[in-house]
Image (tube, rainbow, N blue to C red):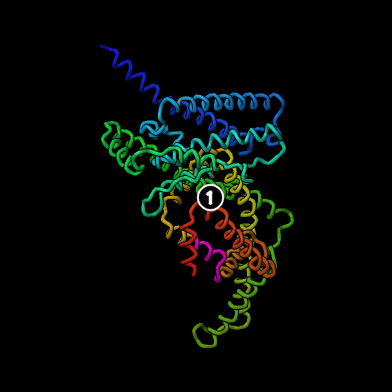
Amino acid sequence: MQTPGFFRSAQRWISRAPERSLNQAYEAAQMIEAIEREYFGGNPISAPYGSYGDSAMAYFQSELSKYLNLIKVRMALFRASRSVARVSDPRVMEIQLPAAEADELAVNVIDQQAMFFRKLQLIDAVLARYASLETNPERVITLANGAPAPSAQVLRSRADQARGGQNGTIAQVPPADSKGAAGLSDRVNVLPRSILRTVDRIRQDLDPNAEQEVVQEFRTSKTKTTAAIRFVLLLVIVPLLTQQFTKAFLVGPVVDRVRAGAEPADVFLNIEMEEEALHELQQFEERLRFEVLIGKAPPLSELNIEQRVRTKATEIEEDYRDRSANAVKNVFADIFAVVAFVLLLVYRKQDVATLKSFMDEIVYGLSDSAKAFIIILFTDIFVGFHSPHGWEILLEGLSRHLGFPANRDFIFLFIATFPVILDTIFKYWIFRYLNRISPSAVATYKNMNE
């Protein structure tokens, strides 16, 4: 009586064997990439890329060897089990992502076939990376076609391309080489894949656990969005509070004590502040004499006019003394604010990764027209025809904030060089990066520019 159930369980276990082996190899590859990001700055696990002692490098090499061996064993089991169980079984192609993995890849729902091949691409990239290091540790890792080994970001971009175009069509992930193309041609089904995907979607809709999966995905997305927004607020609020706090309670008292010492500091920090003060005092005297002449003010003698001008000069002196002290305080308070901002980025790496994942998801979710609109907006603001006026205002405001003289020669030289460099970087980014991940957005951008 229990024999049919046993055979069904055995058949189910065998049919899931390729997926289990692939997932275990994929998790091992992710662990290697996590060590690379955390301790080697995204570079391979090797002595030239990290300043660690012999004991630490021995530990990292043992971890690397363990995960590489695990990948090789599981991939061997994967290839062997494929001859017994068809990988095209719908359950093998199901997406079952834990919350942490979903946050790392910034993917909730993507094409199933794209997810399957993305895991294989990541595993192949890790194996190729360390196969190259074994032959020559000092050599830059390249693939057979001469291109650099794809990183996790490139692999994620390829998987995001597979989500489909703007009209909802499903784009196929380009194979890494001709061998991958041959593997795709071998996977020919009797029925068209579109029909199989439609049947699979219907099966997922009728799955009793589908609602729980949707709720779990929503909770994961909500958690990621909340964490990203919270970190953005921290990046804005913490430096501002640090700047104000240090200026009022730490830097301010020290600067006031030093400037009010035995030898009081100069009223003006630079010649421009002195010229502004003289111009303001001159305007006051001319306005006072003009009001007396037109009868708007009562007649005043030269002595009274001189006394009023002297009183105004004292007020201007106090005002510019405070402005000079405030500029000195701003310099040191801004340094503390920048340090606080950098510390947030260094010690909150997980939040930085979450924010980057959140921003990538927003950007990839935009239509091609929206991407082109944002690119044109930013390029016109920073490197467009009218951008020099904006840069001039920003530089003058910054120099006034820090108490430096607004050097016109430096400002004009900056405007003549920096926007040009920035424009070159924009064009290079569009040519090398955007043209690869979203060619339709580049075409839309060119049409809108014309």
Q: Quadrant of the N terminus?
A: top left
Query: Residue 3: in sight, yes or no?
Result: yes
Is 296 inside the magenta-drawn segment?
Answer: no
Q: Residue tagged by mark 1? A: 240
Most extreme residue toward the bottom is 294
Q: Which residues are magenta?
A: 375-386
Residue in front for this viewpoint, 333 or 359: 359
Q: Is 321 placed left or right of 102 in the picture?
A: right
> Up-down: is 214 above or below 18?
below
Most extreme residue toward the top is 1
Residue 437: percent from the left, percent from the top? 50, 51
Residue 74: percent from the left, percent from the top? 51, 25
Q: Is 152 placed left or right of 266 in the picture?
A: left
Query: Residue 355: in sight, yes or no?
Result: no
Q: Magenta residues: mostly which secondary structure?
A: helix
Residue 64: percent from the left, percent from the top? 61, 27
Residue in front for this viewpoint, 64 or 212: 64
Residue 251: percent from the left, percent from the top? 63, 49
Say which amino acid is labelled 1.
Leu
Query: Which residue is pictured at 42% across the width and 39% down the height?
Result: 113
Helix, strand, or loop for circle 1? helix
Residue in front for this viewpoint, 209 or 11: 11
Q: Is 132 placed left or right of 203 in the picture?
A: right
Q: Quadrant of residue 37?
A: top right
Query: Which residue is pictured at 59% across the width and 27% down the height?
Result: 68
Neighbours of disc 1 within 10 Å: few (<14), some (14-19), many (20+) = some
Query: Which residue is pictured at 51% across the width and 61% down the height?
Result: 378
Question: How many numbered circles are shown?
Answer: 1
